[in-house]
Image: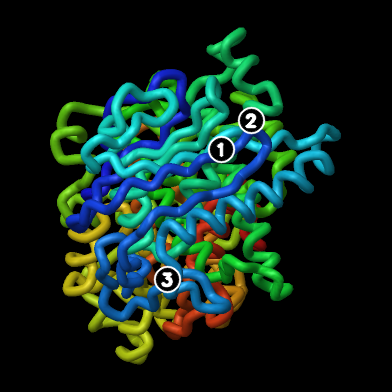
Amino acid sequence: MDDVRAARGRSPRGARVAARIVAPVVVTVLVVTVLVVAAGCAQVLPGRPGAAPAAPTSAVPDGTVPPGGTPAAPGPAGPPVDDLSTDEVATLTVEALQGYWRSRFPADFGRAWTGIREFAAVRPGEAGATAPPCVSRAADLSGQAFYCPAADAVVWDAEGLLPSLRNRFGPVGPVVVLAHEIGHAVSARLGIDAAQRREPARYPTILLEAMADCHAGASVRHLVDTTTDGSARLPVGPAGRDSALLALIGFRDPLGIESGDRSAHGNAFDRVSAFQDGFADGPVRCAAMTLDNREFTQRRFGSAADRARGGNLPLGRLLQSVGGDAPAWFGEVVAQQEPGNGWRAPELTADSTRAQCDPAELAAQGPARFCAADGSVSVDLDTLTPLQEQFGDYAGATLIASRYGLAALRALGAPAEGPAAGRAAVCLAGAYAGRLIDPTGGFGLSPGDLDEAVEVLLAGDWAERDARGQPETTGHGYERVQRFRTGLLGGPGSCGL
């Protein structure tokens, strides 16, 4: 599994805390910056920051890209912000989002926006650093950001957390974290915190975190829209959305924590889903979230053996399990769409050299391949093995399911070539994953599997390539994840069959 796991530190008293992220680089201790903000005002008083870290070279968390994959471009499009320090990015984020909520909050909820009382950027490693609201020592903030309802303050580690996020995900990394914490402040102004105190069972932590992720998505949508119309001081382009999702993935819960756990913040899939809902539908959708209308996919390990191997099957067993399950399921999909069709999904093989297709077109599809000429589905172990080592077992399973999706399209008389086929293949891969969330028996998802699907969809476009290996040239990882979610939530009927 990915080694960026949410490690819990000491939680600030009464604060909504983002999970800590493990910094991938050694961070130089800088001069403490304290942001003094008057009530209802968001003036930022920057300190003396060091040089901004270098921009990332890949959208994949550890900086690598699967061979042959097309990575999503990291960081925002639009006017360059590389010359801004991380503190300056934080300042612009605070200003932009306070302005956004000042206009959007009354428009959506019919009441005036009250400016957040305090924004505090703290350098925990600095000797004598003043403790921010809700914590006893500045050192307790290391690697964290939080919203403190009692003080109406958004507080963050400006020494380690934000520079680390900037280094890994570009300027949008700090933007997402601050937007999330401001999202908690939005919920507080809507009375959610008070309702949670009265009825804690109705408002578990994971729901409050989903609301904040959702509000963060709405906020980033505002930044994307202002980038498009040319008015943005902090531009976030379409590719920046991919980086935003990758940043959220870094704050997922450790494997095996259930959604009902008091400490649960959400797995990567659920957090990304909430962000995308806010981005698409706005703050009203976020505020309306409840346990009744929100499904969380976070599950515990099904067995001690599954826990011991981190939810990952050895590659041979994975191919055996997927190969024994996916053909039957996709065969049922075709039979439901066209009773009497008679199509039998092909067996999964580990030898694509026998396929009656152009080897170059097969190779262009990546580790999993569909040959339209003979209807076969196969894998290439030379590329699938490192993919599993990098992301986990369900990354490869997602690609295999997308190839069975192409096979099902072909069986129904639809083209397996072209952008529409690739988009439908990703959706059908999501529908197949939905079938595995709570299986009645046999092969099913382990904790972390949906996170692995999100990661591989963000890392490259293999799942969306058509039967000739041609990519969708206009989309990004964000859209691939969205289509996967559509299938998972809506089933195969939502994939345009």
Looking at the image, do the residues carrying marks 1 and 2 touch, with CB atoms under 8 Å apart?
yes
Packing grade of label 2 (10 A; few <14, some 14-19, many >=20) is: many
Asked which secondary structure carries label 1, the reply is helix
Q: Nearer the viewer, mark 3 or mark 2?
A: 2
Q: Residue furthest top?
A: 198
Q: Which residue is mark 1?
A: 212
Q: Is residue 408 visible?
A: no
Q: Amino acid at mark 1?
A: Ala
Packing grade of label 3 (10 A; few <14, some 14-19, many >=20) is: many
Q: Amino acid at mark 3?
A: Pro
Q: Position of residue 439 (x, y in %)?
A: 41, 34
Distance, label 3 to label 2, CA atoms, is: 30 Å
Q: Which residue is mark 3?
A: 74
Mark closer to the chain start, 3 or 2: 3
Q: Is residue 111 above or below residue 365?
A: above
Looking at the image, do the residues carrying marks 1 and 3 touch, with CB atoms under 8 Å apart?
no
Residue 381 or residue 160, whichever sits in front: 160
Q: Is residue 167 above or below residue 393?
A: below
Q: Which residue is mark 2?
A: 187
Q: Amino acid at mark 2?
A: Ser
| Residue at the image position 41 percent from the left and 60 percent from the top | 86
Asked which secondary structure carries label 3, the reply is loop
Asked which secondary structure carries label 2, the reply is helix
Residue 453 or residue 377, whichever sits in front: 453
| Residue at the image position 42 percent from the left and 31 percent from the top | 17
| Residue at the image position 26 percent from the left and 33 percent from the top | 139
| Residue at the image position 48 percent from the left and 66 percent from the top | 477
Q: Is residue 90 left or right of residue 358?
A: right
